[in-house]
């Protein structure tokens, strides 16, 4: 059965681009021999990768009330380009995004933003499991920091 492991999320400031971040992440995809043969026969498997705002974990709830929808649900902030999976191994995503995109609590004061990458394997064939396999990276906190 396909597996996802070792997810990461990194946010880096860009020299010369003070209002943007380089966001990136990696994940390890494991496939068994049967799944590899299905991919080689043309059955599609894709890696969907997204940045999510954490509004529900104990870390996010520890700071008290937030100016936005605090505590209701995690929010989708950004979707990376979908990647077609051709073999097991490490897969990397990255993008340059406006800093404001990661300001998930809609507060310009303080560094209380919490975000993570969510990686999902999605199949376009009924020969693979019908539900996607997903894993979240560890949280990155205080990413906006104006």
Image (cartoon, rainbow, N blue to C red):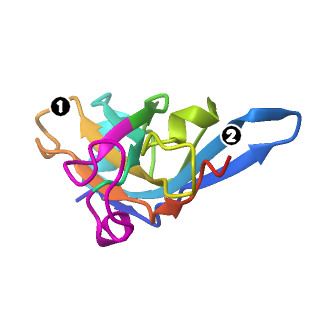
Give above or below for 85 relative to 66: above
First-in-chain label (2 vs 1): 2
User: Residue visible at 68% across and 46% down?
Assistant: 146
Which one is in front, 48 or 97? Answer: 97
Look at the image and say whether residue 65 sits in the magenta stretch. yes
Q: What is the crowding at mark 2: few (fewer than 14 residues within 10 Å), some, or many (at least 20)? A: many
> As drawn, is 138 to the left or to the right of 126?
right
Which one is in front, 95 or 110? Answer: 110
Q: Which residue is mark 2?
A: 21
Q: Which labelled disc corresponds to residue 16? A: none
Q: What is the crowding at mark 1: few (fewer than 14 residues within 10 Å), some, or many (at least 20)? A: few
User: Residue visible at 61% across and 48% down?
Assistant: 144
Q: Which residue is mark 1?
A: 125
Give x and y (percent) for residue 96.
66, 32
Magenta part mainly helix, strand or loop? loop
Which one is in front, 12 or 136? Answer: 12
Point out the frontmost of discs 2 and 1: 2
Figure quadrant of residue 14: top right
Magenta highlight range: 56-76
Q: Quadrant of the N terminus?
A: bottom left
Look at the image and say whether residue 59 sits in the magenta stretch. yes
Q: Are marks 2 and 1 in contact (CB under 8 Å)?
A: no
Give x and y (percent) for residue 90.
54, 55
User: Residue visible at 43% across and 61% down?
Assistant: 137
Give above or below for 16 relative to 138: above
Give above or below for 16 relative to 109: above
Give x and y (percent) for residue 101.
52, 33
Give x and y (percent) for residue 20.
70, 34
Residue 47 in view in this figure: no
The secondary element bearing badge 1 is classed as loop
């Amino acid at each position: 059965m396909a597996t996802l492991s070792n997810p990461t999320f990194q946010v880096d400031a860009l020299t010369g681009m003070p209002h943007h971040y380089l966001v990136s992440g990696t994940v390890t995809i494991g496939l068994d021999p049967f799944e590899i043969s299905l991919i080689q026969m043309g059955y599609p498997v894709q890696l969907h990768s997204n940045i999510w705002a954490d509004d529900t974990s104990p870390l996010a709830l520890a700071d008290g009330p937030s100016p936005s929808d605090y505590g209701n649900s995690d929010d989708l902030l950004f979707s990376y380009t979908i990647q077609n999976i051709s073999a097991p191994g490490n897969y990397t995503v990255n993008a340059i995004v406006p800093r404001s995109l990661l300001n998930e609590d809609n507060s310009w004061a303080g560094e209380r933003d919490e975000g993570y990458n969510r990686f999902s394997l999605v199949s376009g064939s009924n020969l693979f499991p019908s539900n996607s396999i997903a894993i979240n990276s560890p949280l990155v906190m205080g990413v906006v920091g104006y």
